[in-house]
Image (cartoon, grey):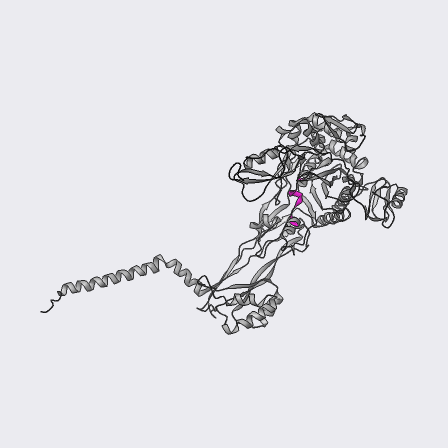
Amino acid sequence: MKKRSLPLKKRLLIVVSFIAIAFVLIIGRLVGLQVVDAEDLQLKALKQQTRDTSITASRGRILDADGVVLAQSGTVYKVLAWPQVIPDSEVNRIASELANVLGLEKETVLKKITTKAKNGKAVKEVVIARQVERETVDAIKSLKLGNGVVTAVDTKRYYPYGSLLSQIIGFTNIDSDGQSGLELTYNKYLAGENGRMITEADRDGKSLPYGIQEYLAQKDGCGLVLTTKTTVQSFLEKNLEEALKVNNASNAQGIIMNCKTGEIIAMSTKPDYDLNNPPRSDLELLSALSRNRIVADAYEPGSTFKIITLSAALDSNTISDGFTANCPGYRMVSGQRIKCWKAGGHGHQSLTECTENSCNCAFMDMALALGTEELYNYIYAFGFGATTGSGLVGESSGIVIHEKYIRDINLARIGFGQSVAVTPIQLASAVSAAVNGGTLYKPTIVKQVISSDGAVVIDNKPEAVRQVISGETSAKVRKILESVVENGSGRNAQIPGYRVGGKTGTAQKYDDTGVAAGKLIASFIGFAPADDPQFVVLILVDEPKVGSIFGSTVAAPFVKNVLEETLRYYGYLESGHDELVTVPDLTGLTTKQAAEALQELGIEAVYQENDEVTAQVPSAGTKVLKGTSVLLYTANTDIVPEDDDTDTEKVKVPDLSGMTRLEAYDALKAVGLIMEIEGTYSGGYVRVQSIEKGTMVRVGTVIKVVFSTKTGDE
């Protein structure tokens, strides 16, 4: 029986349906290719048909106030390879010759140029070497390695003055990204924007002979103009190096500030490092050498803080010009005996004599008379307890115990520079206000940010923060501090022909357990000209390992040198002065012989034992006024643990168990202690504290704490 075929109409309908479905599928695919996936496919085609090479933008220069270049980017080159283009027969030769020229391992180069795919994608370009000099590029081109090895423009950061201003300027990585200092803080201005070179290529990645090239120009970075002066910076660094060496110190720090504007003219910490060759292989060493201690480290200022107490007491009319104090060598405060630095005391003194003698008893009297509220008003007004806003990396706010926790015993100590921790930049700013007429200025180190086309992007003008004391009070403070240099503990800062004021300071350091035996910070802060101050110079010598450690002998001579050179650099002329004598070369003599030779010239010798003199400050040939002290060093000179500000105050460690991070921080800060978290977790409660509750420790001691998720967790 024959099969019955479908009617023609039905067959046509089926065929038409299949055709319609096919058209729908084709149209759908076309829509997918031309609409849905169009952008992605175009991008893939563009990548296949072009080669995209980055053009590094030139990083902005850093200049000093006189236009001297401190940091700049120079043109170097990078060596690139296109693995898809390099013939397999040539890879060994190319790897060997490139490695030889670039000083690399052959296997390293070979691996790069033979990696043609990664994660399922073709590798178009690999970087063989960065920051290659022109001579090396010429050597590579002479090898005729083919189209698979090319070079492109790169940049490298150069620092013409090496270590000068190293902690301030900072350094960059190989990609020219700022890693520390101003290079980091102002990276977004300095970096600029990279450009691109897009070249048409064939399927093998080879450039087409007559292909189109598109060049997108890079946008070079902005430049920085600093307030610093390279010449003055060299004065400071030279003297810090000498202070570090002759005092066998841990470090030496210094800052020079224009006290009328807040501009930082020079700043440094020694030892330092060469910006062109940072010790990247030793991160601990690099961190220590690049740390800007002037803004980051807080320390007990000792007697230099007496300038603040004096200013507050005079300005508030708590004391008058006729103030006197009798010093028997100690004061009894709240039943505790607090000593003056001079055993037996200074006796009866006028206000000026109290400051000349750096008498602790007199400044305790001033602080107690002021009272907590009044003294704290001035402490905060002078800028302590807060960052200065300098914009420098890592700035600390110091340590000021909250006034609600202050008792008379604390207040008395604050009066002469204990129970408070300050940064050097805070102290320099505050003393500038005390002597410049009473105005606190915001410290600045970046004067301008200037675009690559010369437009001023940022213009930092001197910024007055507040009037702290009156002009009349400031004039009195200047006069008293000038007398300190003329007749008192600061006489080693005298500069023949110039009027100088200043104050010494010596303070103990402390570690996790309290006072660090034999570890001191000696400092001197001076200003000139004393009748119309322009410059304030602060130098600190940290942990000097020599005898007779006082700010007057360890730090003051170097402040004198820096101020003298700075005044002459700025054109200040000498006025008439008393008789000068030239310091002879005393090295090789015994200390007693040297002392006798100095005595004949009317100069005092300061030394520890009768031994051969190995170094002296001031150096031979220096002209000084009669009555100046010369510090004599020998091979056996060591610490004499006596100074003017090292009476010890201890506080009780609170019980932190079960406290949250903020509660523990507040409890420690309330008594002047510092919290340091051990481990990475700090969201729970204190489980362990490094020093047991109730232990008496030095103010500023670090208490390490460990947190757990629950109270009582082990």
Considering only vertical position in the picture, is 322 above or below 573? above
Count of marks placed on residues: 0
Comparing 295 with 401, the one in front is: 401
x and y percentages locating residue 480 in the rendered image: 76, 33
* 669 lies left or right of 331: left
Residue extending farthest bottom: 89
Considering only vertical position in the picture, is 318 above or below 622? above
The main secondary structure of the magenta stretch is helix
Q: Which residue is drawn at 54% across and 43% down?
A: 681
- The magenta stretch spans residue 687: no
Residue 162 shows in this picture: yes
Picture quarter with the N terminus = bottom left
* 512 lies left or right of 348: left
Q: Give the range drawn in magenta.
A: 289-298
Picture quarter with the C terminus = top right
Q: Residue at x 17, y 64 (%)?
A: 12
* 668 lies left or right of 206: right
x and y percentages locating residue 558 in the rendered image: 76, 44
Q: Indicate the quadrant where residue 338 lies.
A: top right
x and y percentages locating residue 701 in the rendered image: 65, 38
Comparing 543 with 240, the one in front is: 543
Residue extending farthest left: 1
Comparing 214 with 619, the one in front is: 619
Considering only vertical position in the picture, is 1 above or below 685? below
Residue 145 shows in this picture: no
Q: Indicate the quadrant where residue 309 lies.
A: top right
x and y percentages locating residue 702 in the rendered image: 63, 39
